[in-house]
Amino acid sequence: MKFVDEATIRVQAGNGGPCCLSFRREKYVERGGPDGGDGGRGGSVYLVADTSLNTLADFRVARKFKAEGGEGGSGRNKTGRSGEDLEVLVPIGTTVHDVDTREIICDLTEAGQRQKVAEGGRGGLGNTRFKSSVNRAPRKITQGTEGEARHLALELKVLADVGLLGMPNAGKSTLITAMSHAKPRIADYPFTTLYPNLGVVRVGRLQSFVMADVPGLIEGASEGAGLGIQFLKHLQRTGLLLHVVDIAPLDPHVEPAREVAAIAGELAKFSVELATKPRWLVINKTDLLSEEDRVVAKEMLLHELGWDGPVFEVSAATGEGTEALGHAVMQELERMSERNSDEKI
């Protein structure tokens, strides 16, 4: 299975245009001398971060990108036209690697950020360039150089303020639908979400944050089980993690506390940074339990986990508790932003 958050492409810059070996041939002009023009420069290839894209799906079809070559020079010292640069639009948050050297070329994190990834070839030099006091009729020229070609790996890490994580069918897709205008695919079987979904959660008139619904994780995800580690990468740039847990699983053998602990373990295996990121517990599907059963299930879950962090109870299906969760997240993100600003001073 191929995921749209990773893609490989080939880029080819334009070749430099050929030069011209020419001498003036004009009536009444004796010994006209050289007049061969230079070749045009080949176009370069740039990657540009664009706000209108949020996946790498387009690169599953279009994989080769070639810039225009330079035109040849001509007599009368005419330089060939340079090739047009080629701009390839990619989503914000795209990291670019050179497949052959494995070096990281760039990390496009801001709208409009532009990075040259393949240099256009230089145009050839016409014989006029080599005219001197001792060589009035040079026949020396240089050919245009080939444009740079590279094999690039694109990796998209979702740029979101908040990331949802949890086991398949925990209700993450329903929660992001309830809190934003995102419309992810929802069904009652595991791995409904195959690609990360982004939703903008508006809190009041002038406040909002971006939430990412990441495909469900299972035990062994850090080693490639289930949908693999690709989607753990999407959580790295989020400021806050909301760990969604199904408090009323249909399968009586499923233990919510064990599922929470299993995913926490996968985060730690993947990276220390991800494991230490702020994480809140969101108890979902409370509408399926009576008030008394809800209290008992919550106390049992927190006791088994030894949880001492923030806890929220919601019903993504009915919307109960989602507004309070949104306001709390917004306040926390503002506090985090203030702390980061103070650290930079």
Image (tube, rainbow, N blue to C red):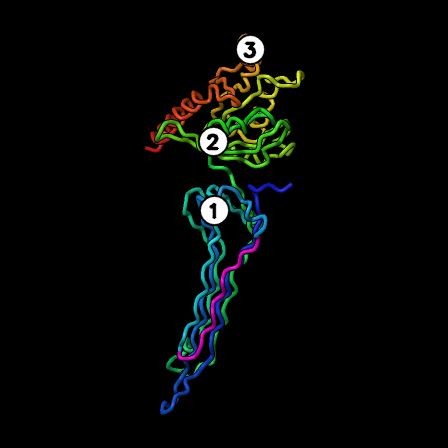
In magenta stretch: residue 329: no
In front: label 1 or label 2: 2
Q: Amino acid at mark 2?
A: Met
Dominant secondary structure (helix, strand or loop) of the stretch shown in magenta: loop
Dot label at residue 290: 3
Q: Residue at x 37, y 81 (%)?
A: 133
| 219 left or right, relative to 176 | right
Specify start and end residues of the magenta stretch as a single range.
Answer: 63-76
Report the label total. Answer: 3
- Please give the residue where the numbered disc 2 appears in the rendered image: 211
Q: Residues within 10 Å of mark 3 (few under 14, many from 20)?
A: few
Query: Who is closer to the viewer here, 63 or 42?
Result: 63
Q: Position of residue 170 (x, y in %)?
A: 58, 24
Q: Mark yes or no: residue 235 visible.
A: yes
Q: Amino acid at mark 3?
A: Ser
Mark 1 or 3 closer to N-term?
A: 1
- Where, quadrant-wise, is the C terminus in this rendering? top left
Query: Who is closer to the viewer here, 174 or 154?
Result: 174
Q: Position of residue 340 (x, y in %)?
A: 37, 30
Q: Residue at x 41, y 30 (%)?
A: 202
Mark 3 or 2 closer to N-term?
A: 2
Q: Marks 1 and 3, how far apart in space?
A: 53 Å
| 58 left or right, relative to 239 | right
The secondary structure type at the circle numbered 2 is strand
In front: label 3 or label 2: 3
Q: Residues within 10 Å of mark 1 (few under 14, many from 20)?
A: some
Q: Position of residue 128 (x, y in %)?
A: 41, 78
